[in-house]
Image: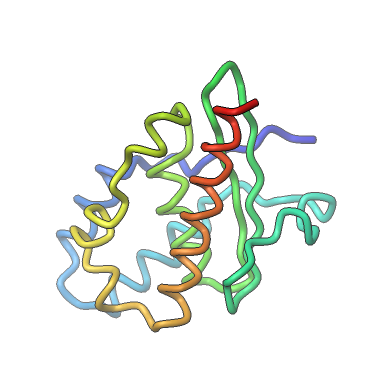
Amino acid sequence: MQPPLATNTSIDEIIENFSFLDEWDDRYGYLIELGKSLTPLTDEQMVDLNKVQGCVSQVWLIHENNQGILTFNGMSDAHIVRGLVAIALSIFSGKSAEDILQTDEQDIFNSVGLQEHLTPQRANGLRSMVQRIKAIAQASLTN
């Protein structure tokens, strides 16, 4: 299995780039570009066990725990959702479980204006993805 790798773009860089884009068409374009930066998952990784429930689009999430640091990778069959996966990975991947559980992702999403520009289905999917990441972090603390 290839190790999961997050997007190479930091969340601070993503927030800064969003601030330069005034139009939401441009921001959607940037989301699509972020999604293209994800390391592809293999067919063996895109199985039901790794599928995020609660997403209208198909989303898969894998993780690796290396001495308490959780690294995530993910993929979606939808371009904009793939960009949302990239943002989530930039926020959470490469952190300890404690840091993940203490992260206020809503503040980050609000800073780029995601909530008011996502369809309810995409917002629910993003919420499901974050819940899955935090559940993985919580489970890693008890193992």
Relative to the observer, which residue lies in front, 100 or 33? Answer: 100
Relative to the observer, which residue lies in front, 131 or 36? Answer: 131
On the image, which quarter does residue 52 sit in?
A: bottom right
Q: In this view, does 120 lie to the left or right of 50?
A: left
Measured as percent of width and height from the top left, residue 51 is found at: 69, 60
Reply above or below: 77 against 119: above
Reply above or below: 35 against 102: below
Number of numbered tags placed on the structure image? 0
- Specify the farthest residue to the front: 142
On the image, which quarter does residue 11 sit in?
A: top left
- Specify the farthest residue to the right: 44
Relative to the observer, which residue lies in front, 62 or 14? Answer: 62
Q: Quadrant of the C terminus?
A: top right
Measured as percent of width and height from the top left, residue 89 is found at: 47, 46
Measured as percent of width and height from the top left, residue 55 is found at: 57, 72
Q: Is residue 62 left or right of residue 47?
A: left
Residue located at (60% from left, 52% from top): 74
- Specify the farthest residue to the top: 67
Q: How is the image coloured?
A: rainbow
Residue located at (45% from left, 76% from top): 122
Q: In which quarter of the image is the N terminus?
A: top right
Q: In this view, does 49 lie to the left or right of 81?
A: right
Residue located at (59% from left, 28% from top): 142
Measured as percent of width and height from the top left, residue 129 is found at: 52, 58
Residue located at (35% from left, 73% from top): 28
Reply above or below: 130 against 2: below
